[in-house]
Amino acid sequence: MDKFVIRTNISLLHESNESARKVEDDGQKIEQVELSSLIADPGLRISISQYHPNIRDRVRRAYLQKGPCQPNNHNFKKRKIGDSIRRFCPTWYGDHESWLEYSVEKEAVFCLCCYLFKNDVGRQGSGDSFVKEGFDGWNKKYRLDKHVGGTNSAHNL
């Protein structure tokens, strides 16, 4: 059988994530993730697609068990938008408690649901702003409701 099969080592696509490490087992390398040390801040996470396919579901389950990153005691940065001073309002967590996340690093909000389950196939409308760049249009709170979408949205599956 070995002359027909070429054995390869399994490796993560993105090795700079500190929560991933290689473990030797029976001569083959198996990728494992230290689930307790996954990065909480959504602005610092690597994409789910950068994890090896064999561990993606474990990573997803770990993030689901942790729940969305929702710092309440943070001093949310104020900025001028138009003629008004705006900032993130922590009461918005209550309106979107299952998916809304705040990144202290990027001072923006993200969507846990889209991070975990949205296919990574390039720019997809406004969804990328809630997964990769972060959304910080504090004067447009209605976009949080619009992001949830209709019955075919990943939020409603």
Image: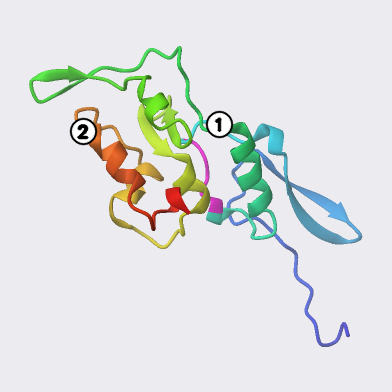
**In the figure, is residue 12 to the left or right of 122?**
right
Mark 2: amino acid: Lys
The magenta region covers: 44-48
Tell me: residue 44, above or below residue 9: above
Which type of secondary structure does the marked residue at label 2 adopt?
loop
Q: Along the line of sight, which residue is nearer the eye, 74 or 64? A: 64
Percent across and percent down for residue 78 are: 26, 17
Percent across and percent down for residue 57 are: 65, 53
Question: Which mark sits nearer the N-terminus, 2 or 1?
Answer: 1
Which residue lies at the image location 33% right of the left edge and 52% below the top edge?
150
Q: Along the line of sight, which residue is nearer the eye, 22 or 55? A: 55
| Contact (Cβ within 8 Å) of mark 2 with mark 1 | no
Tell me: residue 76, above or below residue 103: above
Q: Where does label 2 land, which residue?
A: 140
**Numbered label attached to residue 15:** none
**Numbered label attached to residue 40:** 1
Tell me: residue 150, above or below residue 86: below
**Any magenta on residue 82?**
no
Percent across and percent down for residue 80 are: 16, 21
